[in-house]
Image (tube, rainbow, N blue to C red):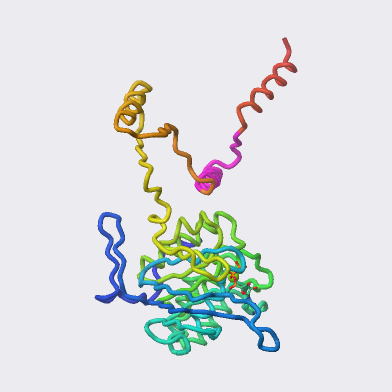
Amino acid sequence: MGKSMGLPGSPVPTADSFILIVEGVRVMSHEVIIETRNLTKVYRDFWGRPKVQALKALDLQVHRGEIFGLLGPNGSGKTTSIKLLLGLLFPTDGEALIFNEPTTNVAKNERIGYLPEESYLYKFLNAEETLHFYGRLFKISKAERTKRVGRLIDMVGLSGAKHRQLREYSKGMQRRIGLAQALINNPELILLDEPTSGLDPIGTSEIKTLIRELREQGKTIVLSGHLLADMQDICDRIAILHRGELKELGKVTDLLTVQDVTQIKARNLSPGAIDEIRELIRRHGGEDIAVDHPTTTLEELFLRIVQESELHPGRRKVAQDAGRADALVAGGRSKP
Ligand SMILES: Nc1ncnc2c1ncn2[C@@H]1O[C@H](COP(=O)(O)OP(=O)(O)OP(=O)(O)O)[C@@H](O)[C@H]1O
Ligand SMILES: [Mg+2]
C-alpha cells in the first residue's frame, strides 16, 4: 500500500458538514447524507409472484463523515440495501434519499463511488487502463486523470502490477483495483460491498486504514460485511440486519459497552495491593471480581508478528517446550 495521501480535489468541508475532533473525540456532523424510510424489497419470480422478502421496512439515516456498517449474515439484505441506495434496484415499498434526492436521480451518481460485491471490471485491461476508462466516463480531463490514476494505484498498493491485465489478478488484487475504481471520481459518498472479502489480514488492515483516511477527508462511507472484528474496528455506527430486518442500530462503542461492569486497569501492582483493592470492592458491594491480564486481538498479534518478521527476516520463534525437547535431543547426542 502506498503512503497515506489525500485524493486530488477533496472537497473542503462546508459549514454544515464539519467534523470536529476535540482531544481525539470525533463530533459528527448531523447533515443527513442517506435516509431510508420504510425501504422494502421483495424479489419476484418469473411470473411476478413474491419470492423473497429481502428487505423489510428499513428506516435509517447516515450522516456526513461517518463510517456506517451494514452487518449481517449471508442473505440478510446487505447487498440489496446498497443496490437500492444506488438506484440499481427499485424498492417494492418505501423510499431512499441520497443527498436529499430520490435514488432515481442519476445526477447524484457523480458524487458516489461504488465497489460492488463481485468484480465486473474488464479482464483484458490493465490497472491503469481500467482507471482511465472509468475516469473518461466521468469526463475527467486527461491531465487530471493521469494524476489521479497514479495516486490511486499507489494508494491501493498495485504499483508493481499496474501493467498486468486484470485477468491475472488475485482475488485481493481485484478488490484493490475495484476500490481504486470506486474512488476515481473523488466521490463524497462511498458504498463498499464487502471491501475486505478475499484480502489477507495485511490487505484488510491496509484497506481499513485507507477507509479511515477517506473519512478524515470528510467523505461518508457505507460498507457491508460479516467479519465482526473488522466491522467493530472500523465502523462509527452499525446496523445489524437479519433476514431483511433491522435488528440493532447504533454507535459501535455504545453497543459493545457492558454497562454493569466496571473495568479498572493498572500497571505494576503488587499482589498485596491487588488484595486490598479486592477487599475495597467487596466492602462497596461489588461482586464477581475478576483480576486478569488483558489480551490483544488475534489481528493485532498477527500484524505485529508479520511486521517483526519483516524487520528481522530469518528469526524464528520456537515454543518453549519444543525448545526443551530439542535441547534434550541435542544433549543426548552430544559427546560426554
Ligand atoms: N436477484 C435476486 N432474485 C431473487 N432473490 C434474491 C436476488 N438477490 C438476492 N436475493 C435474495 O435476497 C436475500 C438478500 O440477499 P442479499 O444479496 O441482499 O444478501 P447479503 O446480506 O448481501 O448476503 P451475502 O453476505 O451473502 O452477500 C437473500 O435471501 C437472497 O437469496
Ligand atoms: Mg452481499
Q: Residue at x 70, y 87 (%)?
A: 46
Q: Position of residue 167 (x, y in %)?
A: 68, 72
Q: Residue at x 70, y 17 (%)?
A: 331
Above/below status of 116 relative to 262: below
- Image region (quadrant) for ligand 2: bottom right
Give the magenta part as a residue range.
300-317
Q: Position of residue 285 (x, y in %)?
A: 32, 33
Please tell me in which quadrant of the rendered image residue 78 appears.
bottom right
Is 303 left or right of 274, judged from the image as shown?
A: right
Residue positioned most to the front: 285
Q: Position of residue 242 (x, y in %)?
A: 55, 65
Is 243 left or right of 277, judged from the image as shown?
A: right
Of residues 211 and 74, the one drawn nearer to the viewer in this rendering: 74
What secondary structure prevails in the magenta region?
helix
Q: Residue at x 44, y 38 (%)?
A: 294
Of residues 186 and 155, the one drawn nearer to the viewer in this rendering: 186
Above/below status of 9 relative to 317: below
Q: In which quadrant is the C terminus drawn? A: top right
Q: Is residue 125 magenta?
A: no
Q: Position of residue 243 (x, y in %)?
A: 58, 68
Please tell me in which quadrant of the rendered image residue 328 appears.
top right
Q: Is residue 305 magenta?
A: yes
